[in-house]
Image: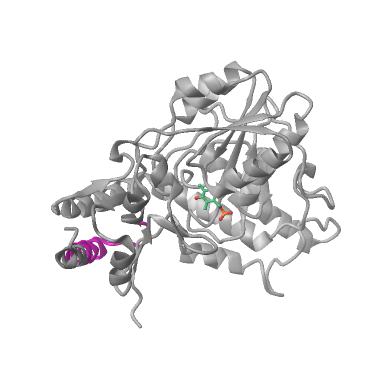
Amino acid sequence: MKHPIYLDYMATTPVDPSVAEVMWRYLTPTGEFGNPASITHVYGWRAKEAVETAREQVAGLIHAEPNEIIWTSGATESNNLAIKGVTEFFQEKGKHVITCITEHKAVLDPCRYLEKKGYEVTYLPVNSRGLINLEQLQQAIRSDTVLISIMHVNNEIGVIQDIVKVGAIAKQHGILFHVDAAQSVGKIAVDVQQIPVDLMSLASHKVYGPKGIGALYVRRKPRARLTPQIHGGGHELGLRSGTLATHQIAGMGAAFALAQSLMPTESIRLAHLRDLLWQQLAELPSVTINGSLQHCIPGMLNIHVHKTDGESLITALQPTLAISSGSACTSAEVEPSYVLTALGLTGEEAKNSLRICVGRYTTEKDIMTAATCLKEKIQWLRGMSPLW
Ligand SMILES: *Cc1c(COP(=O)(O)O)cnc(C)c1O
C-alpha cells in the first residue's frame, strides 16, 4: 500500500536520517555503548562525552547553560517533574497553582492530581484566538500561589502565548514560572536569556529526534528549586535518577543542533507551504481558521469545515492524507477537542475541524495533492449532506 502524505507533524515527527545515524553509534558492541556513569574505563568516558555534547547542543538551541539541562523520558515527564517538584518543594509556602485550560494533558493531569492532594488550581480561559488574558492572570495571583505553568505553543492550534509577559508578571510576584515548550523549541526562536522562565519542558520527537527522551531546563541564576520525583542513584544533579539513555540523548542533541541550523530557512519554507494550502482551501465557502494565523507558528493550520462531518471527512481522506481531526478518542467515545471548545466552538464544530501540519519532508507537490484532495472530498461530502 502506498503511504498517505503525512501532515500530522504536531503529533510526532520522523527521526531525521542524519540523527538516526548518530544514534546508531551508541548501541552495538563496536559502538560507544558504555554507561555514562562508569568512571573507571574508557567505555564510560566516551558515553559521558556523548551525553555532555548533546547537553551543549540542547542548551544551545534555547541559549541556556549545559548544566541547566536535566534529561528526562520526554516532555510528559518534564512537566510532571516541574509541576510536582516545585509544588512539593514549596508546600509550606502555599498550595495554589495557575495554568490554562488549553494546556496539554501532560500539564492538566498533574494539576488534577495536585487538586486531589488538596491543592487549588486556577485554569485561565482563552479568547477566540486561543490566547490568555494577562489581566486575568494578574487577578488570579494570590499570596499562596507557588507556580504558574503556561505553554508556549499550543499543540492543536499552533498559537503562541506571550511567555515573556507572563514571566514578567510571575517575577513581579516572586512566583516560579514553568513553560511547556514541546511545540515551540526548534520551530521558533526560544531564548531563556530573554524569557523570565524558571523551568521549561522540551521534547525530542517533535523536533525530528527519537521518542522517549526529553529534557527539563532548570534555571541556575536565580536557582529554581524543586523536589525530585524519581529516586535511585542521584543522576542529573539528583533531580532525575536512572541510567542515561546515551543513544536517545545523542539523538536529541543532534536533532536540536540540526533544528538550530535549519530554522532560518525552514520556518520560511513551512510558512510558505501552509499559506499555499490555506490559499486553496479558502476558495471553498464556509471554511474558517481556528485560532489565529497571526499568532501561529509556521507550518500549522487548524480549520473548521462548517456543516461537514469531520469523521466522514477524515475517513474519505485517509488513503491520501494522514491528518488529525478536532476530536480525541477517549476510553469509550469520540470527544470533541477541549482546546477547540475553549475557543468557543460547539462540540459539533470542533468535531468538524481538521489539524493540518506540514514539516521537514513536506514538498510543494504534496501540498498541491493535499489541496486538491481536501477540496474534492469536502465538496463531495457537502453534495450529499441535507445540512448543506
Ligand atoms: C507532545 C507534547 C507533550 C508530550 O511530550 P512527550 O515527549 O511525548 O511526553 C507535552 N506537551 C506538548 C505541548 C506536546 O505537544
Please state the horizontal and vertical placement of residue 99, each as a whole percent of the image. 55, 34
Question: In the image, is residue 284 above or below residue 69?
Answer: below
Quadrant in the picture for the C terminus: bottom left
- Name the quadrant containing residue 112: top right
Question: In the image, is residue 22 above or below residue 300?
Answer: below
Question: In the image, is residue 150 above or below residue 37?
Answer: above
Q: Residue at x 29, y 50 (%)?
A: 303
Please state the horizontal and vertical placement of residue 81, each as a whole percent of the image. 69, 44
Q: Compare residues 19 and 232 and report the one nearer the observer.
A: 232
Q: Residue at x 62, y 33 (%)?
A: 121
Q: Relative to residue 306, is residue 140 drawn left or right?
A: right
Judged by its main secondary structure, the magenta piece is: helix
Please state the horizontal and vertical placement of residue 192, each as a whole percent of the image. 54, 32
Q: Compare residues 180 and 110 and report the one nearer the observer.
A: 110
Residue stretch in magenta: 357-376
Quadrant in the picture for the N terminus: bottom left
Question: In the image, is residue 70 above or below residue 192?
Answer: below
